[in-house]
Image: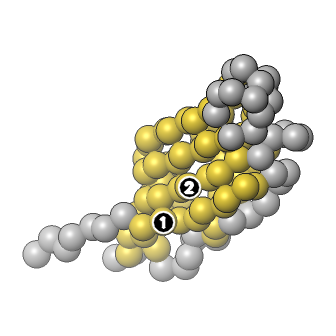
């Protein structure tokens, strides 16, 4: 009989700057599927860079935006199916002086 699959928050990093810093490590006994990455910056900058990368430095999602300083927040929403094996990591990062909020969700699937 099939079992239901529920999404879960993999990590959240509010008002994050710097990095990359590991916020999530795929747990043993599971295959992690990243489904949604949301990056928002309210930084009052003309240019903002923020991204989520894996343990090999590969970028899964990147916010690269230009806006009117002091006026336009920038948001990036990415849907995908990135698979992480046990021990692989996800890290948010920004370039100075960008400050961003990150929200990453997906599935933890049990290994048969």
Residue closer to the observer: 18 or 83: 18
Residue closer to the observer: 40 or 72: 72
Percent x, y of residue 2: 15, 71
**Separation of residues labelled 2 and 1 (CA atoms):** 8 Å
- Single out the residue that lies furthest toward the left: 1
**Residue 50 sits above or below residue 112 on the image:** above
Residue at the spot x=42%, y=67% of the render?
Answer: 8
Residue at the spot x=46%, y=73% of the render?
Answer: 30
Q: Residues within 10 Å of mark 2 (few under 14, many from 20)?
A: some
Q: Are marks 2 and 1 in contact (CB under 8 Å)?
A: yes
Residue at the spot x=81%, y=51% of the render?
Answer: 17
User: Which of the labelled discs sits on residue 9, or is there none?
Assistant: 1
Give the left or right position of residue 59, taking residue 108 as reference: right
Percent x, y of residue 29: 48, 79
Give the left or right position of residue 75, taking residue 71 as reference: left
Helix or strand or loop: what does disc 2 sit on? strand
Q: Quadrant of the C terminus?
A: bottom left
Q: Which residue position is annotated with label 2? A: 103
């Amino acid at each position: 009989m099939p079992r239901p699959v529920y999404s879960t928050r993999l990590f959240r990093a509010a008002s994050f700057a710097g990095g990359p810093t590991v916020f999530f490590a795929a747990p043993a006994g599971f295959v992690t599927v990243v489904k949604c990455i949301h990056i928002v910056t309210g930084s009052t900058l003309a240019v903002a860079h923020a991204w989520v990368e894996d343990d090999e430095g590969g970028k899964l999602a990147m916010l690269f935006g230009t806006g009117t300083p002091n006026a336009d927040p920038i948001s990036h929403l990415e849907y995908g199916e990135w698979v992480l094996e046990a021990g692989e990591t996800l890290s948010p990062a920004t370039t100075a002086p960008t400050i961003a909020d990150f929200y990453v969700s997906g599935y933890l699937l049990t290994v048969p």
